[in-house]
Amino acid sequence: MQFNEIEELNRILSSVSGINRPHEIYVDNLHTPFIQLEDSYILAPTSVHGVEFSAAKEFLLQVEQLVPELIAGCYVLPEAKPKKNSNHLFLVKPLTTSEADEEKKFIFVVSFILSYLGGSPAEMIIKGPAQGKTTSVRTRRIYYLARILPLESIETKNGQLIDFSTRKYKETEFMVDVDTVPAFNKIQHTYSELFDDVDYSKQISLIHSILNMDKEIWKPGKVFEPIDVELHTISSRFLDSSQERILNQFQTFRHLIDLLLSPESMTIDSVKQEPLHNWLRSFGAERDVTPSGNMLWKILNRK
């Protein structure tokens, strides 16, 4: 998208206000969360190579009426981050609370998938795929992912936030010996340059162990990772649709994220973990099946 198009989208976001429409939150069999609305909306077609301005604008004009609490005050990123998620529309908002000091900032990131996932009965299809365009459907689902990332710096242009970099989580933790022949002092990054992807499973398992996150504390289990790793940092991920609630939840355990990113992380066992565990225990999941036979899970929040 062009810079003037980003400015127009940001003007829409700057005036968003109001209360979310009634909805529930689910996670599908691909571990992707979505908001299930009582009302339907039209998901416009866009390029299969990335989100186009016209589709982004139409989407935001509808979503500001459906879940304004999730997107108010955000900025549109000109490019997906990471680039492999080219069909995602990324919105970001630096967190500037009294608790977020200058040395340890964070950024709220919510991304929306603008190509429809799942089966599309004939009555849902507004316009079929054609000439490099995705299908346009009438749907009650908004596929999204909301998370908070540790922030290193932001890049702006004419008052618009156009990029950001994250505080890194122990660079050595992202290196393993991937050679078939053992060699001393030989380490390589476990990533694919072609797909801009990284295998973070080792790091996620380590973080869960340090934070004492087990299946008794986090009932949804592998359905959804609440503490994940992306963009070389720790991602706190939320099954919620309100920025205010997300920030309030995060503030109770953000001290643990700061410690994991600092040299003192080895002393984390002596730090209060109850706020994190209380937040995790507030969630449950109820398994269901879609009309086409795919699994999905309804998220139960014991507030």
Image (tube, rainbow, N blue to C red):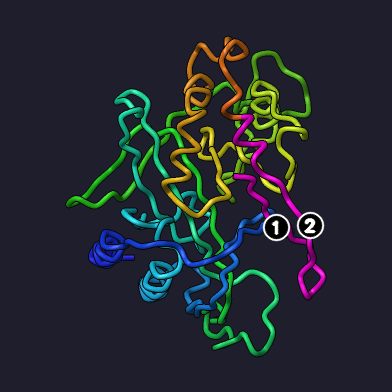
Which of the 4 image quarters holds residue 153? Answer: top left
| For residue 107, above or below residue 176 | below
Residue picked out by circle 2: 287
What residue appears at the point 79 percent right and 57 percent down from the top-left corner? 287
- Nearer to us in this view, 196 or 237: 237
| Residue 198, quarter of the rendered image | top right
Please, is residue 79 above or below residue 259 in the view? below
Residue 4 in the figure: left or right of residue 62: left
Q: How many marks?
A: 2
**Span of residues in magenta:** 277-303
Per the image, the residue denoted by label 1 is 298
Looking at this view, name the residue that lies furthest to the front.
Answer: 303
Q: Position of residue 270 (x, y in %)?
A: 59, 10
Q: Is residue 288 magenta?
A: yes
Which residue is located at x 70 percent, y 60 percent?
Answer: 28
- Are the residues at dot 1 and dot 2 in contact (C-beta closer than 8 Å)? yes
280 magenta-colored:
yes
**Amino acid marked by disc 2:** Arg
